[in-house]
Image (tube, rainbow, N blue to C red):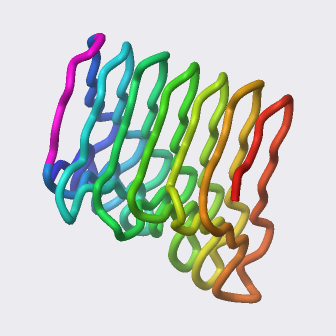
Amino acid sequence: KWCIGYNGADSAKLVFDGNECVYETTGRTYVGGYNKSCSNTLSVTGGAHLKMTGSNGRFWTGRFSGDNFNTISVSGAGTKLTGAATSDSIVGREGSGNVLDVSDGAEVTLSGGLRVGSDTNACANVLHVSGGSKLDIGSKTLYVGYLGCSHSNRVSVSGMNSSLSCGWMLIGSQSWVAFGNTLNVEDGASVLL
């Protein structure tokens, strides 16, 4: 497994770049992994393809409380991130202000579901799909705010030809105190259920 930002590490960055270059990992990938690890970044850009393979081929950002403001950025035409695990990837498991940003024609395809703000007190985590990009989780579920007081998490899909595809979408799904979670679709984008 990979962990970008571990045990209090801040501002670590791992970049995968290069047209038609393929990179592969077989374990779970953490961005902001433990003990208040903040502002760490995983970037896939320039036509690269990051393949997360095997039964643990997925990502978590903001793994524990205090692991805040960590980012996965997938950007540029031809750039891809794929995850083979059938269990959920997570943007903000317990942390806050974590981001998955898919932009400028990039594609993210996951075999499992996706949670934006997963556990108690995970707040203000963001999924943003823009610039003609696509995020596809097939028949799986997108959760926007999942457990306990997971609040103020946001999914934004914007721009012509940008799309988000999932089987189900649950906003504030597991608790009546999971409040202020939102979905915004604008400027010619689409959400396909």
Image quarter where the C terminus lies is bottom right
Total count of labels = 0
Q: Tell me where residue 79 appears, x and y as whole percent.
A: 40, 23
**In the image: residue 85, left or right of residue 179:** left
Q: Check the image and report above or below for 36 versus 77.
A: below
Location of residue 39 by image quarter: top left
Image quarter where the N terminus lies is bottom left
Q: Tell me where residue 70 appears, x and y as whole percent.
A: 44, 45
Q: Check the image and report above or below for 71 versus 178.
A: above
What residue lies at 38% left-to-right and 67% top-to-bottom? 64
What residue lies at 49% left-to-right and 16% top-to-bottom? 77
What residue lies at 61% left-to-right and 68% top-to-bottom? 143
**In the image: residue 183, left or right of residue 94:** right
Q: Tell me where residue 174 appears, x and y as whole percent.
A: 64, 86
Location of residue 183 by image quarter: bottom right
Which residues lie in the magenta part?
Answer: 19-25
Q: Tell me where residue 148 appears, x and y as whole percent.
A: 61, 85
